[in-house]
Image (cartoon, grey):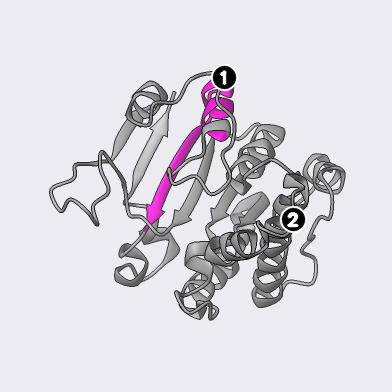
Amino acid sequence: MDKRDVVLKIGGSVLYQENQDINFGIMGKLKSWYVENRGQFEKVVFITGGGAMSRHLQERMQGNIQNQLALHNIAMSVTQTSAELLAGYLGDSSILIPKTLGDAYEHLVKEGPGTIVSGGLKSGWSTDMDSVVFADILQEKRVYKISNIDYIYDEDPDKNPNAKSFKDMSWDDYFDLFSITENDSHEANGSIPIDRGCANFCKNKGISFFICGGENIAKKQSIAELFSDGTLVHP
C-alpha cells in the first residue's frame, strides 16, 4: 500500500513561550513524534509560524515603514527562523528548508520520501495558507495545526468561561461563526483560528483543517495524543 503524506502547521504561539524563549517542551514532543513516525509517511511537511515575535516586530516598525510588503516580509522572516530552529532540533540532515515556493514544489512532487520544514514563503499569505497549498500539491485532504487554543469556540473563552467549544464543524459553519465571505483575503494579525484566505482556499479545494493545542499541549504526553482531541473543520 502506498504511504500517505502528512502536513503539520506549528503555530509560533506554541514554538515560543510568552517571554519569547524557545518552547523545548513542544519541540521535544515533535521530535519524538517525528523519529517514531517518519517511516509511516512518504512526505512529512512542517510549516512554522512566527507568533508574537512576528506581530511585535511589525508593530514596532509600522510607524517607520510605509511599505506594507516590507512589513509583511519582516514578519515572514521570523517564520523562516522558526523553521531553521525546528529543522535543526529534529536533527535529520536530509530535511529541506525551502527558500521559495518553487523549492518547496520541486521537493513535494519529487518521487520518494522527504521532509520539509518551512516558514512563510509568499508575501501576503499567512503560514496557514502555505500549509494548505502544500497539502493541495500533495493531494492531501487534511492539515493538522497545533496552536495556542485547544478548540474553536463561539466566543473568546478567556473572556467568557461559558463559551461553547466545537469538536466538529463544516466550513459553512466556520464562515458563519467568523462572518467570512468568499471574497475575503488574509488579514495580517487577524485573531481568528484559520485566516480568511486560507478558509476560502480550503472550502474551495475540499480540504479539512484540524486544530488542537492550548492547555492540552502540557496535558497530553505525545503529539499522537494531542491529535486525538481538537476541532475538525471540514467540507
Determine the residue located farthest toward the front in the rendered image.
Answer: 63
**Nearer to the camera, 2 or 33:** 33
Spatial CA span between label 1 and label 2: 28 Å
Vertically, is 89 above or below 39? Answer: below
Horizontal and vertical percent for residue 40? 59, 54
Q: Is residue 115 magenta?
A: no
Please report the bounds of the magenta region as a residue range.
198-213
Secondary structure at numbered mark 1: loop
Q: Nearer the viewer, residue 64 or 160?
A: 64
- Is 32 above or below relative to 232? below
Residue position marked by numbered label 2 in the rendering: 65
Question: Where residue 191 sits: x, y (%)?
Answer: 44, 46
Residue 192 position by quadrant: top left
Seen from the viewer's position, the closer of residues 189 and 140 is: 189
Residue denoted by label 1 = 183
In which quadrant is the C terminus drawn? top left
Report if residue 199 lies within the magenta region.
yes
Is residue 141 visible in the rendered image? The answer is: no
Please state which amino acid type lies under the numbered disc 2. Answer: Ile
Is residue 222 among what the camera can see?
yes
Secondary structure state at the residue bearing disc 2: loop
Which comes sooner in the sequence, label 1 or label 2? Answer: 2
Residue type for callout 1: Asn
- Number of residues whose C-alpha sits closer than 10 Å to that of mark 2, classed few (under 14), some (14–19) or many (20 or more): few
Q: Quadrant of the N terminus?
A: top right
Which residue occupies 77% across, 47% down?
67
Q: Residues within 10 Å of mark 1 (few under 14, many from 20)?
A: few
In percent of width and height, residue 112 lies at: 79, 48
| Contact (Cβ within 8 Å) of mark 1 with mark 2 | no
